[in-house]
């Protein structure tokens, strides 16, 4: 949790010395638990991904939600385990300094999008949603979520990533509703 807090405030530019000082430990003690800072960052991201996957599963399994409510909730998913991330440069720094970990995050997002696309296709087939070009829909979601990771946009808009996802989901879902609803 302390390492995640360091990432939230300093991005990936925190040092193991910073973390050791925060925990009142020696760096040697930290290295007894993590072989490297890369391993630590990897574990933090793996925990955040697992958190998102657990939330996603709860949404899919919630029979009390309509398809529209599920889509809206799925589009808003962001890690909760470490609290809100307000360091807008974190995403760009991960992409630049930790490409393997960024790929792990990207792969997770791709898998989420594939599951969401399947839900949309099923819902179109059962007439719960109006017919749309699913390939275009998938590209729109991909492009928008990628752009919402842009720290400059977040900073200029004074938003967190979770805030921007929520706004996007609200806009997106109301465009999917059938004309009669």
Image (cartoon, rainbow, N blue to C red):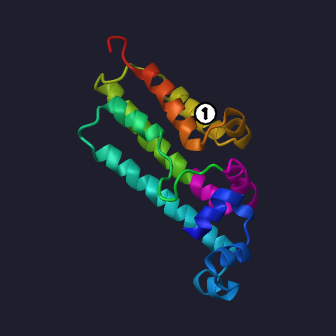
Determine the image quadrant of residue 154. Answer: top right
Assign the N terminus to one quadrant of the image. bottom right
Determine the image quadrant of residue 9. Answer: bottom right
Residue 71 appears left or right of 83: left
Residue 37 visible (yes or no): yes
* Circle 1 Cα neighbour tier, 10 Å, few/some/many (<14 / 14–19 / ≥20): some
Magenta-drawn segment: 87-106
- Seen at 32% across and 26% down, the residue is 125
User: Which residue occupies the extreme left position in the image?
Assistant: 63
- Seen at 39% across and 51% down, the residue is 55
Assign the C terminus to one quadrant of the image. top left
79 shown above or below 75: below
Determine the image quadrant of residue 128. Answer: top left
Residue 19 appears left or right of 75: right
Determine the secondary structure under disc 1. Answer: helix
Q: Position of residue 65 (x, y in %)?
A: 28, 36
In the picture of the structure, the residue carrying the numbered disc 1 is 144
Q: Position of residue 90 (x, y in %)?
A: 68, 53
162 shown above or below 133: below
- Dominant SS of magenta comes to helix
- Seen at 58% across and 69% down, the residue is 2
- Seen at 53% across and 63% down, the residue is 46
Residue 118 falls inside the magenta stretch: no
User: Which residue occupies the extreme top position in the image?
Assistant: 180
Q: Position of residue 143 (x, y in %)?
A: 62, 34
Q: Position of residue 68 (x, y in %)?
A: 36, 29
Residue 98 visible (yes or no): no
Count how many numbered circles sit on residues in the image. Answer: 1
């Amino acid at each position: 949790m302390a390492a995640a807090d360091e990432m939230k405030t300093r991005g990936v530019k925190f040092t193991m010395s910073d973390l050791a000082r925060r925990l009142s430990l020696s760096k040697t003690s930290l290295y007894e638990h993590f072989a490297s800072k890369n391993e630590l960052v990897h574990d933090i991201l793996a925990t955040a991904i697992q958190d998102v996957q657990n939330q996603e599963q709860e949404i899919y399994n919630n029979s009390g939600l309509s398809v529209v409510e599920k889509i809206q909730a799925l589009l808003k998913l962001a890690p909760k385990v470490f609290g809100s991330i307000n360091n807008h440069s974190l995403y760009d720094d991960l992409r630049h300094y930790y490409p393997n970990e960024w790929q792990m995050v990207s792969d997770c997002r791709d898998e989420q999008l594939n599951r969401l696309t399947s839900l949309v296709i099923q819902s179109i087939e059962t007439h719960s949603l109006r017919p749309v070009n699913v390939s275009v829909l998938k590209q729109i979601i991909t492009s928008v979520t990628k752009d919402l990771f842009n720290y400059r946009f977040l900073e200029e808009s004074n938003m967190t990533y979770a805030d921007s996802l929520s706004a996007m989901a609200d806009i997106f879902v109301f465009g999917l509703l059938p004309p009669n609803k």
